[in-house]
Every structure is written in structure tokens, then in C-alpha cells.
Amino acid sequence: MDIGVVTAPLTAVAGVVGTLMSALLTQRAADRSRQREQERADELWDRRASAQELWSCYVALNTSGRRYLAALTDQLHALGRDAEAPQARQRLTGARDDHREVYAEAQMRLPERVLDHAAAVSHGLGTVYGMLRRLDGGAPRPGDSPAAAHAAIESLWARLREMRREMRADVGASRSDSGR
């Protein structure tokens, strides 16, 4: 038997198999590449969605804190004014309830350093709320006074600004601040 007769078909078969395997390997590499690209795109989308949810939580917490502080201020100004008191109480109760809901959600989402600020603000809001309700009801505790409530509200505005700075720093929004 001549070696050339056997070698030619084997070479042809090897060539065909090689060509088919090359196409198959190229297809598999392209599939893997597409899969990795899709995974990167999904991961990026998840990170963006997570960042958007955190941003929304920050906005809601800031808004509810500001609303609650404004309602506390309204309640302070309504002390002793019978005509304004019912509306101020109603606004305060609504703002307090809204803040409680937003803060409860924030407790599950916020990083610890931001949550520490949010907890301090929330505790302060509750303290002033209690003081104003006692003053409004005519049963103040020692240390409860309109002046003390006013001072506590001013302090809370500063705490809220600090919390907002911390939230902005967390999401990278403070990079463009001019130091304020």
C-alpha cells in the first residue's frame, strides 16, 4: 500500500475537521465574549439602579426632614394662638408620620455613617415634637419652653445640613461644591 494514497485522505479529513473545529471554537469564543459583555452591562445597570434607589431615598429623607422641621416651626409659632393651632397640629402630625415612614426605609438602605446622622436628626425631631406637644397641651416638663424649642429647631437645621452633606458626599455629588 502506498503511503501517499492513505495520507491524502487523512490530510483532507484533518483539514476539514480543523476547519470545522476552528469555526466552532471561534463561535464559542464569540459567545463567551458576548456573555461577558452582557454580564458587565447587567452589573452596570444594577449598580445604576441601586445608586438611583439610594439617591431617591436620600432625597425623600432630606425632604421629609425639612418638612418636619418646618411643621415644628409652624407649631412653635402657633403656640398660644388658638385659631392657628389645629391646622399646625395637623400639619405636624402629617409631617411626623411621613418622616417616620421615610426614616424606616432609610434605616434599611443607608450606609452606617449616613445613618448615624439620620438617626441623630430623627431623634432630635422627636424630642422637639414631644416638647412642643407638651407646651401645646399645657403640661411642660422642666426645661420645656418656646425658647428651648426654638434653639433645638435651629440646631436641627444645622444637623440636617450636615446629614445632607454626608449624603451628597456618599453619592459623589459634593465634588462640585465650592466649599459651602
Image: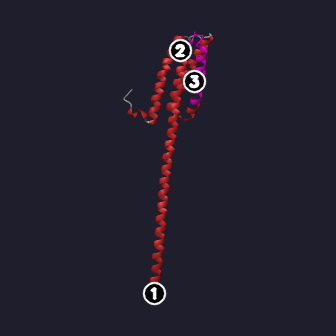
- Amino acid bearing label 2: Ala
Mark 1 and mark 3: span between their CA atoms?
Answer: 94 Å
Q: Residue at x 48, y 54 (%)?
A: 36
The numbered dot on residue 149 is: 2
- Residue 5, numbered label: 1
Scheme of image coloration = secondary structure
What amino acid is at disc 1? Val
Is 137 in the magenta? no
**Residue 90 occupies quadrant:** top right
What kind of secondary structure does the magenta stretch mostly adopt?
A: helix
What amino acid does circle 3 point to? Ala
**Place of residue 164 in the rendered image (x, y in percent of width and height, measured from the top left):** 47, 28
Q: Which stretch is magenta?
A: 75-103
Residue receiving disc 3: 95
Q: Label 3: how many residues lie within 10 Å, few (<14), some (14-19) or many (20+)? A: many
Sequence-earlier tag: 1 or 3 = 1
Instruction: Please tell me which of labels 1 and 2 falls first in the chain.
Output: 1
Relative to 37, say whether 68 is above or below: above
Residue 24 image offset from top left, x and y in percent: 49, 67
